[in-house]
Amino acid sequence: MVTSLRRSERLRESIGPFLDFFTGTYAALTEDPETANFAVGNPHEIAMPAYVEALRRHLEPQDPAWFAYKLSEPNAQAAVARTLSARTGLAWEPADVAMTNGGHAALAVAFRSLLEPGAEAIFLPPPWFFYELLILAADGVPVRVRLEPPAFDLDLDALEAAITPRTRAVLLNSPHNPSGRVYAPNDLRGLAGLLTEASDRIGSPIYLISDEPYNRILFDGRSYHSPAEAYPYTVVTYSYGKTLLTPGMRIGYLAVPPTMPDRERLRDEFFVTQLETFAFPNADLQHAIDDLEALSIDIAALERRRDRLVPALREMGYETTLPEGTFYVMARAPLADDQAFARILNRHKVLVLPGSIVELPGWFRVSLTASDDMVERGLPGFAAAMREASGRPS
């Protein structure tokens, strides 16, 4: 009982800022219809008709086992393998793919399979909320190597210095939430070379967990390259909730490339780990996967919102990123205390995510999934908050 409580407290501490925000400010302000909500990547418009029609069509049972217990359905595995093969140029097999109930579950399975108690996993803050939590839940030791704003470049020297004989995994998120940075093939080749040399030095492979839920949300004509193309010991995790903007419909996967030296062992370990919590997607979503693979939200609309928000915020005096992908723009707050500045924005009917919640104090995150109407309503609030924080007259 004591051990369980201590573990629970450790996990609670890792997501304390997240819980405080989402059970406090966020919950209160989302009830206000006048608030322009830029805080998270939630939909603010009705889901795509084609998505709804695909679910409706595949909800109709075609045999008595249509809604029976499901593991990774062969049709879903085959659809994902075809997509991965086309996107990476590698010959992925359906057996390489483990279907999961979302990207969160895919990461949890990866960490639980790859980490033994006390093993180290490196991740690169500013992070998605739950990376540290998932490493701790797998009895691993989280190790941070920061991506520094405003460029958020990979620091290979710092990464190399962080690797020890206990390092078992490095987590890379690209396109990167929250910065919007997309790491280019040269970056990935450099990382692959570093991990290959480090694996040889410590005498065991360092796995690269490539968290890719935004890999189809790219701007300015960019294309995406997975680290799996450069580094054999890569585990790819993915969620359909971003490309379809349906985060409450939980389906994703983790997969190992055909170049993975021990992929048959990992396939088996992933399967056993999934059985721990039955981390498989619902039957209807797996039946619909061929149709869902062909769908995407309007990326051009996200890009137009980026191109409306970024120049407007910069003209007001904010320093911002220009994201290459994802849903998010990062902006530097005019106050060192980003939480205090977020409260000023709240008074002006604007809701953002304070940067300290993603380990980037002094900044805040703006989601491009806000509707066009919210963008236009929110811009005067951003301007008024800047004036108030700077002590300028209204």
Image (spheres, rainbow, N blue to C red):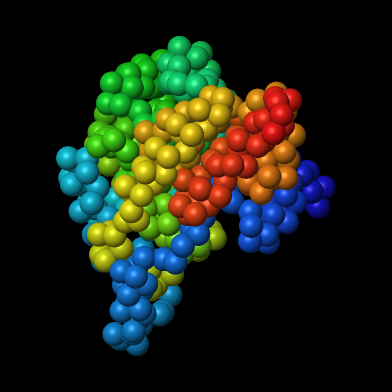
Residue 337 x/y as whole percent: 72, 28
* The C terminus sits in image quarter: top right
**Observer-nearest of 171 and 271:** 171
Residue ID at (72%, 49%): 25
| Outermost residue to the bottom | 64
Residue 301: give x, y in percent of width and height.
Answer: 36, 49
Judge whether residue 143 can be spotted in this image.
Answer: no
| Left or right: where 345 falls relative to 126 | right
Is 94 placed above or below 133 here? below
Residue drawn where x is 38% and y is 58% of the image: 244
Can you tell which quarter of the image residue 57 is in? bottom left
Q: Residue furthest front?
A: 393
Measuring from the top left, give residue 252's x and y in whole percent: 40, 55
Q: Nearer the viewer, residue 292 or 70?
A: 292
Is 51 above or below relative to 322? below
Give the number of marks.
Answer: 0
Dividing the picture into quadrants, the one containing residue 67 is bottom left
Q: Is residue 322 left or right of residue 12?
A: left
- Give the residue displayed 47% in from the left and 28% down from the top: 321
Looking at the image, residue 150 sits to the left or right of residue 139; the answer is left
Residue 308 visible from this viewpoint: yes
The residue at the far right in this view is 2
Q: Position of residue 119 (x, y in %)?
A: 56, 31
At 68% from the left edge and 61% from the top edge, which residue is drawn? 31
